Image (cartoon, rainbow, N blue to C red):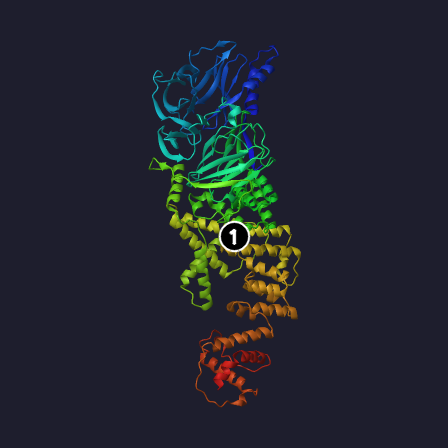
Amino acid sequence: MALRLVADFELGKDVLPWLRAQRAASEAPGAGGGGADVLENDYESLRVLNMERNGNIIYTYKDDKGNVVFGLYDCQTRQNELLYAFEKDLEVFSCSVNSERTLLAASLIQSTKEGKRNELQPGSKCLTLLVEIHPVNNVKVLKAVDGYIWVQFLYPHVESHPLPENHLLLISEEKYIEKFRVRVAQEDGNRVVIKNSGHLPRDRIAEDFIWAQWDMSEQRLYFIDLKKSKSILKCIQFYADESYNLMFEVPLDISLSNSGFKLVNFGCDYHQDREKLSKHLSLCVFTNHTGSLCVCYSPKCAAWEQITYSVFYIHKGHTKTFTTSLKNVGSHMTKGITFLNLDYYVAVYLPGHFFHLLNVQHPDLICHNLFLTGNNEMIDMLPHSPLQSLSGSLVLDCCSGKLYRVMLSQSSLLQLLQNTRLDCEKMATLHCALSCGQGAQFLEGQWRQRADLNTNRVLSDFLKIIQWISENVSACHSFDLIQEFIIASSYWSVYSETSNVDKLLPHSSVLTWNTEIPGITLITEDTPLPLMKVHSFKGYWEKLNSNLEYVKYAKPHFHYNNSVVRREWHNLISEEKTGKRRSTAYVRNILDNAIKVISNLEARNLEPRLTPLLQEEDSHQRLLMGLMVSELKDHFLRHLQGVEKKKIEQMVLDYISKLLDLICHILEASWRKHNLHSSLLHFNSRGSAAEFAVFHIMTRILEATNSLFLPLPPGFNTLHTILGVHCLPLHNLLHCIDSGVLLLTETAVTRLMKDLDNTEKNEKLKFSIIMRLPPLIGQKICRLWDHPMSSNIISRNHVMRLLQNYKKQPRNSMIDKSSFSIEFLPLNYFIEILTDIESTNQGNLPHCSQGPPTFVLTSSVLPSLFTSVNCFLPKILLTYK
């Protein structure tokens, strides 16, 4: 299953054993043996009523006398407590307890038993009571009406000091919501009583609504009312000081005029018509800490051959409507669509038919949503009974009395990643799996040192993802798997460090997706942005408002890209070749940035790396690193208002060093699989199949980073070149060098010159390599190779430098032949020119400090001179004339 369910609470395990123990303790010695049977009957009536903000769960059951008993399970202490008992055979409809457990509000339905009606309040169908329970004392009737009433205490904080006033919401089937203010006082020590119970102040905060939802965790009330046949979604936020504000209103393009009255998450509603539930509309609001606001809607379904559902991404300003056809639909569907809040995702689930994970943060491309169909174990693990999606990824199964914490299963997603064949499913599954552990942060040293089993499990799964990528780099045709992994993992690694960073960094390497997703169709429409009713925002509302402002004004995307870095890097390389580089301070600052990145990378990996990446000074890669630091820092400073400059600098270093770290881990995974060792760093060995496999991985990494213009870890190009020399024939090797697949570094070429002897084959290789080196590196390498060929190259380069600015000077046409031993006038003239130039410029040449150079016609110099004459013969003859 793509989801993992962890049971936080079970009536059968957390409550029933305690009830049995209580009953056993109360049984007098020698009493009748019917206690066990009574307990089994009690278990049948045992059910969950409500869950409060602090996590405490209220449940009810009927004892052997038919009395209604209220109990509370404390999620912190994992202890049970009896709250109250009604000595009447009533049916509990709704219940809530205040945070101090001194007041109990309950709505009860009078029932008829054996033809006799319980007359707690004659002439009324539903009673709403407020009870003093610390200790048990007065009972006040709040409502006695024919319609249903739901109750809910407000919780200003999860843990707070006792307040003199409690606030209670009453939600009526007559389509109004009232807030009662209940003042309490302590008498006779700890006894808590209601003050002025005859008249409790109340406010009507909503009316004429047709749908409402309670968010217990954030203390928000969402409701929809109809204005001129338009559905208007509104939200009221309740604060710690017991005040409240209407936060926003937004029109929704849905029809609710004939849908009837419905409430969501006001306790467990056991009075819904289960037979009609599957065809009833589903509507719920989901938020998360990043400022997202989604409305999930599925209309009434008359036939099950085709099903439609919509998600209003209010924080993005658009709606997506999905339609899918169902196969093998039975004549009777027992359950409708279930929407689940999974923080960064919303799950849409229909047992036995489909499972759809919708990306809340980045809903633009359909390929980032995972859509699975069929009746298999990957999508058919959730309970088939109706589920309530609560705050914080909690799901309550009222029928079984179980509370689950639902989360994405990284191991199951990895299994799906390995088995699926569709590129769209690979893309979506990869993003889902990375969001589970938020990417590369689990590769940090501090996480490695923790003994937490869950963290170790997530880390293990993440390393398995890397291993799978290293083995399947060519598995996807619609996108580059390495690019997608690097960009997505780097994004998740810094995602939680500050708000709005998700708007500034790319989360995917794919910008468009035009391929259809099998089994589903999509329509995208713009949605009006909500009208905010307040002007000062904090917490979630500040983030939501930031998202809305981004939608309003950010026409060009704010996502960072390396286009400026690419242009500036090419300029610096060109300046280096021409010798006209700009100010030294500018270049030094860029290189200092690169040093900081490398130091940050090394600090995160205290253990030695398996892959022998040499810590060399690759100037071109360091320029790229430093430029990326500079540009990304400027990008953040422009758009992250109010964030300290020092924090931004650290974020940039973290992002780039984690990006490099990911490349290292992909390489290490392949290195580990093929069991390679550091001896291959020598050139005097032949390449194996394992080395060729690693060379192929490195080539794909190089292609991926070149396309995105990302830096590579220090030593990457050297190791890549060494493996290329081992594995490729000479003509293929030279082709890779000429096409830029292999980048020659000074370290790699130096090792090649030292490790290989001067056989005919090696000489050909060395000469071919030297001729392709940049001039500055070539001059150094030629001096390391004691060979006539290198002397030839040195001489040619020296002559070229001498003649670069040579101008013809008047001279005696008669040449003194006695000083030359060669009867070839052009060569004699050429030697004379070179001697005169060196004599004139010896004070300006770097090597002149070792004494004035002279051309002595030895056997080792003659070949070089003849080659030089061949190269410069046209100019020599022109001068000689």
Compared to residue 504, the image places residue 371 above or below, namely above
Compared to residue 596, the image places residue 90 above or below, namely above
User: As shown in the figure, which amino acid type bears the numbered disc 1?
Assistant: Leu
Q: Where is residue 412 in the image (x, y as percent from the top left)?
A: 59, 39
Residue 649 visible in the snapshot: yes
Q: Residue at x 46, y 62 (%)?
A: 570
Nearer to us in this view, 851 or 754:
754
Residue 608 visible in the snapshot: no
Nearer to us in this view, 88 or 417:
417
What residue is pinned by disc 1?
Answer: 660
Q: Which residue is drawn at 55% across and 59% down?
A: 717
Left or right of residue 534: residue 79: right
Quadrant, the N terminus: top right
Compared to residue 557, the image places residue 175 above or below, namely above
Quadrant of the rendered structure where residue 24 is?
top right
Nearer to us in this view, 754 or 667:
667
Nearer to us in this view, 738 or 846:
738
Q: Position of residue 127 (x, y in %)?
A: 43, 16
Q: Where is residue 59 in the image (x, y as percent from the top left)?
A: 50, 22
